[in-house]
């Protein structure tokens, strides 16, 4: 169960991050250059997709009754963490998304 | 009132938020702590051993103890060791809370356990503010309505909900406080709305009794029976004839297969031919709160007499909402989600309170302001310190009191409560005599120190108690950081003119 829980939280964070970076202002803040249109749309698409994956993982961990409750909580807290990290350590905030592939590898090995 | 709709909403949000925010902060903090009430109980009563005894063994030892000491009692209550509450408690009579005897689950011998209000104090304070029960429920209900109003008016007056969804600009004084208040409120809006609304639903029959009055002529027992919660008729004749109790272990196994983890059992009319064994599930096996549900077995034959009733749609809806508020489902990961969401809610309320003063500080604290305006501003400032950091101080003082007060003290529990309120009062007085910023720093620093040094009280025999201390330590470090930032900001204003109210970092 802990694996699914962790995955749900990680994908929630990755989704919020992608949606955030899909906004002109926040992309510029991290990378100091404007965001190309294609990338912007891509980031938003990936963001929503990651949130959906997060919902599936939460449902996997808790079932479809409790899963959505946990999903909302994870989304909120992931967003909160992101908002707190961005102004102080913008690169770290983006770098944290590297935990998603690490999690994927661990899932395959487990 | 003001001219436009948005202005009147802003007016309502500001003043309702300030006046009621002080108590709402206390309700949210104690509610957040109550998420881990059983863990706090366990930490506050270090005599209870953490053991891994099967529930069946524990139940048999409890029955043996009751046979030896209370064979004539009309009711035996047994709380079995569970994941969150490793103690084994037996009691007689109808008393649900307190009373009873703690047993060592390994031997079935009684153990001396200090009296302590435990984490249950935070739970009770959360919905009664320690007033007489019904008064408290009404006051807290009214505050919850104000909270709902504050949330809705907050949504109305926040014009850039999506544009500033991810925005937080630190070190910009008032701007930073507003950003943080907005971000924490918007991002956790589902949680805020859910927790406030479901909180009101718990006592809906106390707040709006008209439905039960109309349909059942105010007879709430008839109402509960109509829901299928009817208590089994007690067979009076049989209860006078002696009988021999069946072994509880197979019944526990049967109930566990049906209900999931078991919380405890009641044996009515033990040692008579009319004995009934009621086995109740732990609260967290599903979202809907299963309080009051039990499987009933015949105490002599071991036959199942009544299963848990299925709720109809309307009561089930209410139960699910109540369950969403109680957060007993989903195991520890869910509990942590609720706890952290609760912490963010508390900080959201606190940031709103601070924002009130930050926004007005320059206008009212200066010498040119009217004396009466300055006096009122000072009241708001003092209350902010006393109700925010003062309450935190009171909470951690309760934990210290539970360990430091002499074990043999008469009415020890009420002394613990006195320590809580006494500390709170002292904090308010301290805030009244110190300059606001120094009062913030001193009180937050003291809370941080007390949290971090909880470990010095020892008694960390098992993972759960270590967890409580570790969590307090993390919170202590965070509060210490806040205190440090406020102190830094206090010495900054000479450098930058706009730096007056820089104290972000909550």
Image (tube, coloured by chain):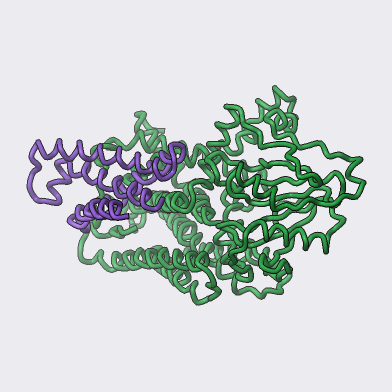
Q: Is residue B48 visible?
A: yes
Q: Is residue B484 left or right of residue B86?
A: left
Residue drawn at x 11%, y 40% as measured from the top left: A39
Image position, residue B476 (x, y; %): 42, 66
Q: Is residue B479 left or right of residue B228?
A: left
Image position, residue B215 (x, y; %): 70, 22
Q: Is residue B373 visible?
A: no
Q: Nearer the viewer, residue B214 or B115?
A: B115
Q: Quadrant of the N terminus of chain B?
A: top left
- In this view, which residue lies farthest toward the top? B215
Relative to B280, does residue B156 appear above or below in the rendering?
above
Q: Quadrant of the C terminus of chain B?
A: bottom left
Relative to B138, does residue B450 appear above or below in the rendering?
below
Q: Nearer the viewer, residue A71 or B423?
A: A71
Residue drawn at x 15%, y 44% as measured from the top left: A25
Say which quarter of the image contains residue B80: bottom right
Q: Nearer the viewer, residue B372 or A107?
A: A107
Question: What color does chain B have in the rendering?
Answer: green
Q: Nearer the viewer, residue B263 or B288?
A: B263
Image position, residue B293 (x, y; %): 66, 41
Tally of numbered discs: 0
Image position, residue B11 (x, y; %): 40, 38
Relative to B170, does residue B278 appear above or below in the rendering?
above
Question: What color does chain A have in the rendering?
Answer: purple
Relative to B355, does residue B295 appear above or below in the rendering?
above
Residue drawn at x 26%, y 37% as measured from the top left: B162
Residue drawn at x 71%, y 74% as measured from the top left: B408
Q: Is residue B494 left or right of residue B231?
A: left
Q: Is residue B235 left or right of residue B378?
A: right
């Amino acid at each position: 169960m802990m694996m699914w829980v962790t995955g749900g939280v990680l994908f929630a964070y990755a989704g919020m991050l992608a949606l955030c970076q899909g906004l002109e202002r926040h992309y510029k803040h991290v990378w100091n250059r404007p965001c190309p249109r294609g990338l912007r749309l891509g980031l938003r698409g990936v963001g929503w997709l990651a949130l959906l994956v997060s919902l599936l993982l939460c449902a996997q961990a808790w079932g479809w009754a409790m899963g959505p409750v946990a999903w909302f909580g994870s989304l909120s807290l992931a967003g909160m963490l992101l908002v707190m990290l961005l102004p102080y350590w913008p690169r770290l905030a983006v770098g944290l998304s590297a935990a998603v592939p690490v999690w994927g590898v661990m899932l395959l090995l487990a | 009132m003001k001219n436009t709709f948005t202005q009147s909403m802003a007016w309502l949000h500001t003043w309702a938020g300030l006046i009621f925010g002080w108590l709402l902060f206390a309700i949210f903090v104690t509610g957040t702590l109550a998420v881990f009430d059983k863990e706090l109980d366990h930490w506050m009563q270090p005599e209870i051993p953490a053991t891994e005894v099967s529930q069946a063994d524990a139940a048999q030892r409890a029955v043996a103890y009751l046979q030896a000491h209370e064979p004539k009692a009309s009711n035996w209550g047994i709380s079995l060791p569970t994941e969150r509450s490793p103690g084994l408690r037996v009691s007689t009579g109808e008393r649900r809370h307190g009373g009873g005897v703690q047993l060592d689950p390994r031997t079935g011998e009684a153990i001396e356990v200090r009296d302590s209000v435990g984490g249950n104090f935070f739970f009770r304070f959360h919905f009664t503010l320690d007033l007489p029960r019904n008064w408290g429920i009404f006051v807290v209900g009214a505050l919850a309505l104000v909270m709902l109003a504050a949330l809705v008016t907050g949504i109305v007056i926040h014009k850039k909900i999506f544009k500033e969804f991810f925005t937080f600009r630190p070190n910009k004084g008032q701007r930073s406080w507003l950003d943080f208040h907005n971000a924490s409120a918007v991002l956790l809006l589902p949680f805020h709305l859910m927790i406030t609304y479901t909180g009101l639903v718990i006592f809906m029959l106390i707040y709006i009794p008209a439905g039960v009055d109309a349909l059942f002529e105010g007879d709430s027992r008839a109402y509960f029976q109509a829901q299928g919660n009817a208590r089994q008729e007690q067979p009076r004749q049989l209860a006078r004839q002696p009988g021999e109790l069946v072994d509880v272990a197979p019944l526990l196994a049967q109930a566990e297969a049906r209900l999931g983890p078991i919380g405890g059992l009641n044996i009515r009319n033990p040692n008579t031919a009319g004995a009934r064994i009621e086995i109740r599930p732990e609260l967290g096996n599903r979202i809907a709160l299963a309080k009051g549900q039990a499987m009933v077995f015949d105490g002599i034959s071991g036959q199942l007499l009544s299963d848990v009733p299925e709720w109809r749609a309307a009561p089930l809806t209410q139960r699910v909402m109540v369950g969403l508020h109680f957060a007993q489902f989903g195991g520890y990961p869910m509990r942590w989600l609720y706890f952290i969401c609760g912490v963010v809610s508390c900080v959201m309320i606190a940031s709103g309170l601070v924002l009130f003063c930050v926004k007005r500080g320059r206008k009212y604290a200066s010498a040119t302001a009217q004396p009466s305006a300055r006096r009122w501003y000072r009241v708001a400032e003092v209350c902010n310190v006393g109700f925010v950091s003062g309450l935190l101080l009171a909470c951690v003082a309760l934990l210290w009191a539970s360990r430091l007060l002499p074990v043999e003290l008469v009415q020890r529990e009420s002394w613990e409560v006195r320590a809580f309120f006494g500390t709170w009062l002292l904090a308010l007085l301290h805030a009244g005599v110190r300059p606001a910023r120094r009062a913030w720093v001193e009180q937050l620093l003291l809370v941080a120190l007390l949290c971090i040094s909880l470990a010095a009280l020892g008694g960390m025999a098992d993972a759960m108690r270590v967890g409580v201390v570790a969590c307090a330590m993390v919170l202590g470090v965070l509060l210490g950081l806040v205190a440090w930032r406020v102190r830094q900001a206090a010495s900054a204003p000479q450098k930058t003119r706009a730096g007056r109210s820089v104290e972000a970092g909550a």
